């Protein structure tokens, strides 16, 4: 086996980067187009939301969506780069000179590892920050009645719109038991339509029921009136457990660096933070997934024939394998969220399975 020259490595790496740039531009453009159309549909009845605002929202969301589509960009780029090398008989010349498939793939693999680490440590924090801004603007401009929830060092905070104004709920701690939420040291600030505080309800504890907060040890404080005390008190609410889960700070709005601290704070507040723990593990697995996508492309294109029929079959097979891997990753992710699979297995298994299957096939074709 001959040692591959630095010039050839640079050439192979540059061809892959050019193909990756083209795949990035194509897929990012399609994502931006479809997101803009969807936001225009949702904002069709809102006069305050114009076309430029919609495009701005779509651009804020774009980095997050591009990050999700990055494995497919890498696979398509590798497929096209190998297609070009084969069509120009470059692969034939390299293989006849004693250069192995692993040497041909090494420059692209090195670049993909670097890309995966850069995405994890640099691009992800930027994408998460922009996605958080997008979510806030979307709620304010398109869905202003959405419930907002925050868990921090000061405890649990939740705000909901009411027919007469708004209510802000604070609790020192929250315990989750299945689909039930139990609150300790609850304070509910009730305001009118002009955001003027009308009264405050304090309770030793509370539970979220169906359309109501069941409070115990209640004190109702209203300006100019004596404190009203109740052993139990039901405060009407439109908040449901599902809404609380949905409005929980989305994992995608937190960067790779911030997720561990958020998980620790959430678990201290009584929440399992399972989606955030699973998302963090999936981020850790992303560089391995990018390497796996390079090998998946190589499994279909490294030994491809130059006949049009051969290319067509292999291209369709590669795209089908990419979609199959995507659905498998979504399936295992759902199993992880439902606690059917351990978090580590749910996050890492798609990348590892794709990596091992591709390596097995390439070892068989290369070494027999």
Image (spheres, rainbow, N blue to C red):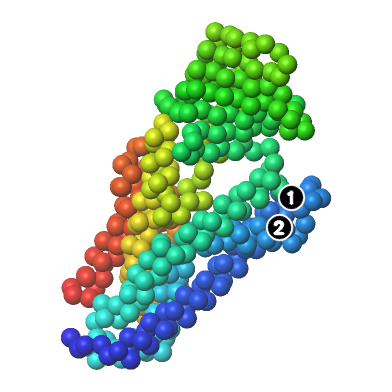
Residue carrying label 2: 54
Relative to the observer, which residue lies in front, 192 or 33? 192
Q: Give the side of residue 122 with respect to residue 191, left or right.
A: left
Residue 58 point in image, percent of width and height: 64, 59
* Above or below for 7 versus 339: below
Q: Are marks 2 and 1 in contact (CB under 8 Å)?
A: yes
Q: Badge 2: how crowded within 10 Å, few (<14), some, or many (20+)?
A: many
Residue carrying label 1: 43
Which residue does the image show at 50% across and 22% down from the upper left? 185
Of helix, strand and loop, which one carries label 2?
helix
Residue 321 point in image, percent of width and height: 40, 61
Of helix, strand and loop, which one carries label 1?
loop
Residue 82 point in image, percent of width and height: 39, 79
Q: Residue furthest right?
A: 47
Q: In which quarter of the image is residue 226?
A: top right
Q: Can residue 303 be seen in this view?
A: no
């Amino acid at each position: 086996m001959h040692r591959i020259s630095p010039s050839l490595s640079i050439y192979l790496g540059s061809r892959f980067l050019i193909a990756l740039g083209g795949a990035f531009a194509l897929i990012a453009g399609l994502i931006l187009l479809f997101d803009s159309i969807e936001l225009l549909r949702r904002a069709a009845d809102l006069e305050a939301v114009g076309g430029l605002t919609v495009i701005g929202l779509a651009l804020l969301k774009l980095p997050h969506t591009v990050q999700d589509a990055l494995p497919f960009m890498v696979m398509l780029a590798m497929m096209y780069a190998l297609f070009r090398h084969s069509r120009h008989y470059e692969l034939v010349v390299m293989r006849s000179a004693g250069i192995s498939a692993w040497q041909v793939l090494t420059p692209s693999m090195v670049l993909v590892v670097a890309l995966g680490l850069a995405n994890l440590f640099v691009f992800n924090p930027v994408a998460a920050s922009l996605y958080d801004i997008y979510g806030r603007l979307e709620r304010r401009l398109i869905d202003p009645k959405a419930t907002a929830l925050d868990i921090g060092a000061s405890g649990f905070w939740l705000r909901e719109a009411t027919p007469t104004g708004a209510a802000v709920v604070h609790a020192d701690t929250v315990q989750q038991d299945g689909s039930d939420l139990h609150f300790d040291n609850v304070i509910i600030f009730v305001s009118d339509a002009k955001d003027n505080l009308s009264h405050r309800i304090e309770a030793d504890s509370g539970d979220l029921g169906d359309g109501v907060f069941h409070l115990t040890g209640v004190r109702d404080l209203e300006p100019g009136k004596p404190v009203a005390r109740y052993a139990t008190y039901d405060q009407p609410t439109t908040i449901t457990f599902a809404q609380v889960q949905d409005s929980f700070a989305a994992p995608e709005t937190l960067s790779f660096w911030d997720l561990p601290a958020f998980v620790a704070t959430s678990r201290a507040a009584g929440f399992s933070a399972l989606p955030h723990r699973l998302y963090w593990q999936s981020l850790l697995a992303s560089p391995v997934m990018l390497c796996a996508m390079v090998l998946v492309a190589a499994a279909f294109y490294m030994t491809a024939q130059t006949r049009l029929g051969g290319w067509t079959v292999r291209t369709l097979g590669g795209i089908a394998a990419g979609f199959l891997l995507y659905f498998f990753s979504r399936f295992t992710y759902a199993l992880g969220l439902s606690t059917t699979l351990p978090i580590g297995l749910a996050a890492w298994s798609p990348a590892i399975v794709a990596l091992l299957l591709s390596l097995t096939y390439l070892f068989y074709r290369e070494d027999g």
